[in-house]
Image (cartoon, rainbow, N blue to C red):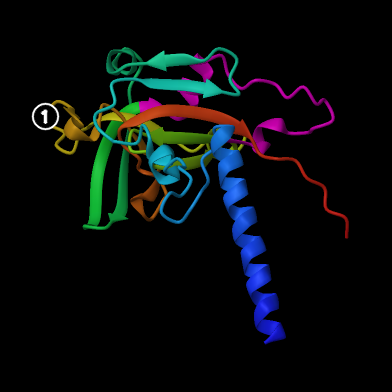
Amino acid sequence: MHLNRRFAYVAFISLTLSIALSIMLSVIGIEQLTLANPPSKPNLISLAREGCDGGFSEEIRVGGQVVNPKTFTLADLQSLPPEEVQVNYITMQGPESHTYVGVPLWTLIQLAGGLKPNPDLTVNNNSIRQYIALDATNCYQVVVGVGEVDPDYEGKQVLVAYATKDDPSEAPQLLGDRGFARLVVPGDKRGGRYIFNIRRISVFYSPFSRYQL
């Protein structure tokens, strides 16, 4: 009996404090949170996907660690000396073989003023610590190491292509619904980096770290 009275007393005190707290919060304009009234919060998935609806890209912005960021349109690419590259690669639909026409990725970097020098003069061979990230309108992203395209290193003929020329007897054909430009990476066995509807090309530094053994 004594325990029941004690339990009832504790329950009464708890209820009284809860009511008092509710009244105080309502007086100062703060609504008490309950399971029926959870706190509102942003939809993080929606925020992350904002601006990722896909669609046709009409220009490419080259920026990041370049001296003079620059925007290119299809007409800009077509005004530059074209290069062709024949590639074979595997897609989800099977093997593909095409001849692409476009402008070297390295050329676009140079037209944007070239790589911005690293202010840390203690860093040797700065360019091989840099990479190029390419973003599509659906937020698909691929990366190319600067050392892959820098003529002082591998110098690979990575193209920002705007047309195909699979039939030599015909004029180059624009890419259609794939946007006005796509990346072409000779030597890649799979087409994962053949990003289309490109909207941004950005140069970044890889993070510097020292490991102590």
Toward the viewer: 61 or 184? 61
Res. 154 visible in picture: no
- The residue indicated by pointer 1 is 170
> Between residues 48 and 17, which one lies in front from this camera angle?
17
The answer to which image quadrant residue 9 occupies is bottom right
Tell me the SS state at disc 1.
loop
Give the x, y percent position of residue 183.
Answer: 37, 36
- Stretch of the chain drawn in magenta: 103-131
Q: Residue at x 66, y 76 (%)?
A: 7
How many discs mark residues in the rendered view?
Answer: 1
Tag 1: amino acid? Glu
Can see residue 88? yes
Quarter assignment of residue 54: top left
Query: What residue lies at 32% left-to-right and 45% top-to-bottom?
Result: 87
Q: Position of residue 201 (x, y in %)?
A: 46, 28
Q: Is residue 197 magenta?
A: no
Residue 117: x percent and y percent?
Answer: 70, 21
Residue 121 image-quadrant placement = top right
Asked if 105 appears above or below 78 in the picture, the reply is below
